[in-house]
Image: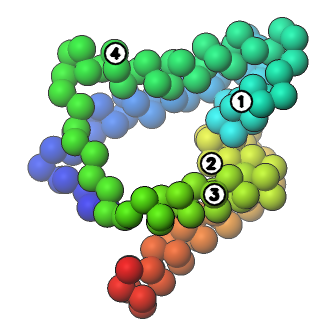
Amino acid sequence: MTVDWPSFTPWTALAGGALIGLAAVLLALLNGRIAGISGILGGLLKPVRGEVAWRVAFLLGLVGAPLAWAAWAALPAPRIDAGWGALVLAGLLVGIGTRYGAGCTSGHGVCGLSRFSVRSLAATAVFMGAGFATVFVLRHLIGF
């Protein structure tokens, strides 16, 4: 993956980050929940009465936000430099990692770090390091 620097707009990136932070803060303040996507989605797999509506609304917002943005501006064309097999394997490994790490990148990296959680700092360092190492090995050592 490469960054398309001529198309990079720091203001939209800043606005996107601010909106993610605002959504995490509002979910914590209004609902007492952490905005960890794996936990929100996982809660729908074993539904509990009174927990389904907010989870569905949050996930619909994740899908609906880019669709709403597309009404005002063109979405960038996705470019994925991997085949279906690699994507499926990566998805399974991320899913397994979220179970072992008791949370995902959004739960630990966004919400946990903002609460100064040492556990989230360790988890974020581990999954970022694992990601860096995986890309280095696959792209530079194996040439995949």
Tell me which amino acid carries mark 1.
Ile
Task: Please indicate whether residue 111 sits to the left or right of residue 49 in the image.
Answer: left
- For residue 65, which quarter of the picture? top left
Q: Picture coordinates of residue 43 (x, y %)?
A: 78, 29
Which residue is at the far bottom? 141
Circle nearer the N terminus (2, 4): 4
Q: In the image, 78: left or right of 27?
A: left
Counting labels gives 4
Residue at the limit of the structure toward the right, as seen here: 48
Q: Which residue is mark 1?
A: 40
> In this rendering, is residue 73 above or below 133?
above
Q: Amino acid at mark 4?
A: Ala
* Label 4 sits on residue: 68
Q: Amino acid at mark 2?
A: Thr
Q: Earlier in the sequence, mark 4 or mark 1?
A: 1
> What residue is shown at x 69% (from left), y 39% (from top)?
38
Q: Along the polypeptide, which appears first: circle 3 or circle 2?
A: 3
Residue mark closest to the camera, 3 vs 2:
3
Q: CA distance from mark 2 to mark 4?
A: 24 Å
State the mark number for residue 92: 3
Q: Residue at x 61, y 13 (%)?
A: 57
* Name of the residue lying farthest toward the left: 6
Q: Is residue 129 above or below residue 28?
A: below
